[in-house]
Every structure is written in C-alpha cells, then in structure tokens.
Amino acid sequence: MSELRIERATPTGNALFPTVRPRRLRRTPALRELVRETSLRPADFVYPVFVTHGRDVRVPIDPMPGQAQLSIDNLVREAAEAQQLGIRAVLLFGLPPTKDGLGSGAYDPDGIIQQATSALKQALPDVVVVTDVCLCEYTDHGHCGVLLDDGTVANDATLELLARTAVSQADAGADVVAPSAMMDGQVTAIRAALDAAGHEDVPVMAYASKMASAFYGPFRVAAGSTPRSGDRKAYQMDGANAREAMRELHQDAAEGADILMVKPALAYLDVIARARDAFDLPIAAYNVSGEYAMLKAAAANGWLDERSAMLETLTSIKRAGADIIITYFARDAARLLRSDA
Ligand code: PBG
C-alpha cells in the first residue's frame, strides 16, 4: 500500500490524498503566518503627494477619497506622519500657479517641486524625496513634452527640458528622480545631465514600462494634467504588449536606470513578474490612481471590505515581484501593518 503511494508520488496533483492535506498548514493564524511567502512592510511603500502653492491649503481630490492637494507646510506635516509610520519615501507631483507651452514651471529653480523638495529635506532630512520628471502638469496643452503644430510630441526637444527638470530637482535636494514622460532616451539624457551637474549620486527611477492607461484618470483630475487634445498613445505604451514592455525595460536598464518601474500595477502583474525574472535591479510598481479609486468606490458602497481588499491588492503586487510599491494607500496600509504587529 505504501509502495503504491510512493509510486504515485508526483510533484503535481493530489494523488497522495489522504496522506497529503494542504489544509494542515492553514489551521491556525500562527501556522498561516509561519508559512506565509509574502509580507508587506511600511518601508516597501512610496507615498505620492500633490503639492500646491499657498499656506495651510488642503484641497480634497474628488475621485481619490482621502487624498488632497497640499501646500508645502501640510506636505511636511503629512510626510512626517508617514515617516513615523515607517514609510521611507514620498513621490512629489507639482501644481504650478501658471502653465505654458514649454512647461517652464517644471524646471524653474524656484518652482513648486523645487521649493517643496528643499523644504522637505530641511525639515525631514531622512525622508527619501522622489520627484516626478515630466512636463504634463506644467504645459498648457497637457502633453508630457514639447507639442508640435501637427499634434505630435517632439521627442528630442523634450529630452533637454526633462534633463533640466531633473537637474533643478536634484539641485533642490531630490534623493531620486523619476522620469515618467515616456520619451525615448530620457534616462540617458537625464543621467548625462545629472552627472555633468555633479549629481552622479542621484539615482534614476525609470518609468520604464508605462502603459497608456485609463487608470490614470483620477490622477489627471488631481494634477490638472488631462491633455487638451488628443491622447498619450503615441508615447505611452500599448497595454496589450508585454514583449515590448520587456524591450522598454531593457532599454532603460542599458541607459543606466537604477530602479525599473512598471505602471500601472494591477492590470500588468505579468509584466512585473517578467521584469523580476529578467533583472536584478530593484523593481518598482505603481498602484495608480484609478486602482485606488475603484477600490475606494467599492468600499464606500459597502461592496468590498476596504482593509482586506487593500492588503490583498498590495500583497499581490509584491508577490508578483515588486520591491517597491508606489501607492496612495501607503499610510493606511502602514497603519494597519503596524497595528497588526
Ligand atoms: C505624469 C504621470 C502620470 C501618472 C504619474 N506620472 C499621468 C499620466 O501619465 O497621464 C499617473 C499616476 C496615477 O494615475 O496615479 N506623466
């Protein structure tokens, strides 16, 4: 009888039942914790924040319940709170007072992000300040680069402006710069400009695989960055293409990216997993605004349990292979993880 069982022992299937019973390891919370393969830590999270001018400003963002546009004083307060929860990094997006065709607010040495970065580094030197390098929040047309008359976004002319943006952010004290414009060669251009400016120690977190996604909708409300005409499909990727995503990741790694990002996260867990297998660089995944909004909306209707759905979602992103999770849930999740301990 036992010989028969050994003969039937294959790594797949449950031919060994009743000897093998996977439920044995699920019997109690302690056993389940003992064999848990993936766990979240507050230090895994990057908390994205929208920064605006003024004092004591806090403008709630409608499609992102719990998130707000913050003036710099409130940003410092929230970042301090996040730090106390064990979150190490914030990602800054800026709302400039005025916009123009070339997005000059992005590389203004006294721009909103530059001011916010130096204020943060002064108040909280240990917080890792990551800055978004893109023009879409600063251009009056809402595109991520220089817009030509025929409606296309000029790649190479944009590179120079992105490089200036990154250098001005690093000058202000940014710890990491994160180019999200999806221009070809943006990592090379930024790396070269940073090095030339003496910022060879500032890493680049590259939005390497960034899809043209409907899940950015709430962000564009928050950042006022919806393109006035057209869409971003001629520079952001087609979400149907995983092999092309790998080419983008390889390209950015070759250009010197220090961290590779996949964005959005949930609809692209396969890309995260492939990136994890293919690279030894840290992999970041962006749990974007629409992913946050849909969970919040379902929870507000009583259709989902917010806490467990949030943790399940974040765990899935980590399990897929992300080392770093950029998420608007950062503070809520960190609070829960700490109360758990
Ligand atoms: C800027 C940028 C966007 C996001 C991050 N950086 C918007 C876009 O590409 O339209 C989206 C983040 C989110 O949805 O949370 N290029």
Image (spheres, rainbow, N blue to C red):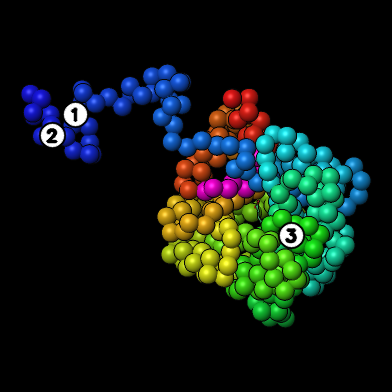
Q: Is residue 333 magenta?
A: no
Q: Is residue 125 visible?
A: yes
Identify the element where label 2 is drawn. loop
Please say if the residues under marks 2 and 3 sit with CB atoms less than 8 Å apart.
no
Q: Earlier in the sequence, mark 3 or mark 1?
A: 1
Please say if the residues under marks 3 and 1 sit with CB atoms less than 8 Å apart.
no
Identify the element where label 1 is drawn. loop
- Which amino acid type is marked by label 2? Arg
Residue picked out by circle 2:
8
Is residue 172 shown above or below 298? below
Residue lying at 18% horizontally and 31% vertically, measured from the top left:
15
Write down which quadrant ligand 1 falls in: bottom right
Residue picked out by circle 3:
225
Residue picked out by circle 1:
16
Point out which mark residue 306 bears. Answer: none
Q: Position of residue 91 (x, y in %)?
A: 70, 51
Identify the element where label 3 is drawn. loop
Is the residue marked by circle 3 packed among few (<14), some (14-19), or many (20+) residues within 10 Å?
A: many
Is residue 300 shown above or below 252? above
